[in-house]
Image: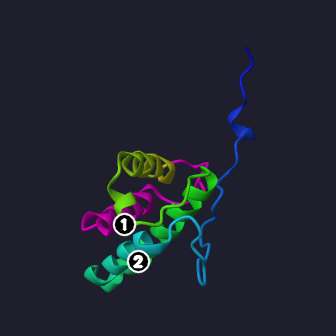
Amino acid sequence: MSQVPPSSFPQGIIGKGHKEKDFKFLILSGSALALIQSQFVSLPPSQRRSANRALFYFECFLWLTNHPPIASALDLRTNAFLIIQRLFYGALHSKCFLAADIKHSGRRRLVLYFFKLLAEC
């Protein structure tokens, strides 16, 4: 059995400093997206940028995993959503998903703020 060398893996699908301005959500949409975005007002202004970036990364993750659309707020309460959420948290800590030069503290911050966005949903 042959092994694939680690150097052949992608070095981060999303590079450091990537801008998500004017990004169009395709998989996360409808009342599900509106409910999550409504939680931004409950965050301090200093946390909103990281929370917005985490939501952008989540949409990218859904697209990469070929996840079916999440359009209803009820979809946020399913076991399938809990599973994809856990997989996303793992992806945030992967150097194949985010650029390797993103520090561990930045990755933890993304997880925390994404969790805060979903806490009231």
- Residue occupying image coordinates x 46% and y 68%: 55
Specify which label sits upstream in the sequence, 1 or 2.
2
Dot 2: what SS?
A: helix
- Residue occupying image coordinates x 60% and y 67%: 16
- Residue with the mark numbered 1: 73
Looking at the picture, which amino acid does disc 1 mark?
A: Ala
Is residue 45 within the magenta segment? no
Asked if the residue at tag 2 contacts the one at tag 1, i.e. Cβ–Cβ closer than 8 Å, the answer is yes
Lateral position of residue 45 relative to residue 21, left or right = left
Q: Quadrant of the N terminus?
A: top right
Report the colour scheme.
rainbow
Lateral position of residue 120 relative to residue 117, left or right = left
In the image, residue 11 lies at what x, y percent? 67, 51
Residue 68 lies, with reference to residue 87, above or below; the image says below
In the image, residue 114 lies at what x, y percent? 37, 64
Lateral position of residue 49 relative to residue 96, left or right = left
Q: Residue furthest top?
A: 1
- Residue occupying image coordinates x 47% and y 66%: 71
Q: Quadrant of the C terminus?
A: bottom left
Mark 1 Cα-neighbour bin, 10 Å: few <14, some 14–19, many ≥20: some
Q: Which mark is residue 99?
A: none
Mark 2 Cα-neighbour bin, 10 Å: few <14, some 14–19, many ≥20: some
**Towards the viewer: 83 or 104:** 83
Lateral position of residue 106 relative to residue 16, left or right = left
Residue 100 shows in this picture:
yes
In the image, residue 119 lies at what x, y percent? 26, 64
**Towards the viewer: 76 or 64:** 76
In the image, residue 35 lies at what x, y percent? 35, 74
Residue 98 shows in this picture:
no
- Residue with the mark numbered 2: 34
Magenta range is: 94-121
Looking at the picture, which amino acid does disc 2 mark?
A: Ala
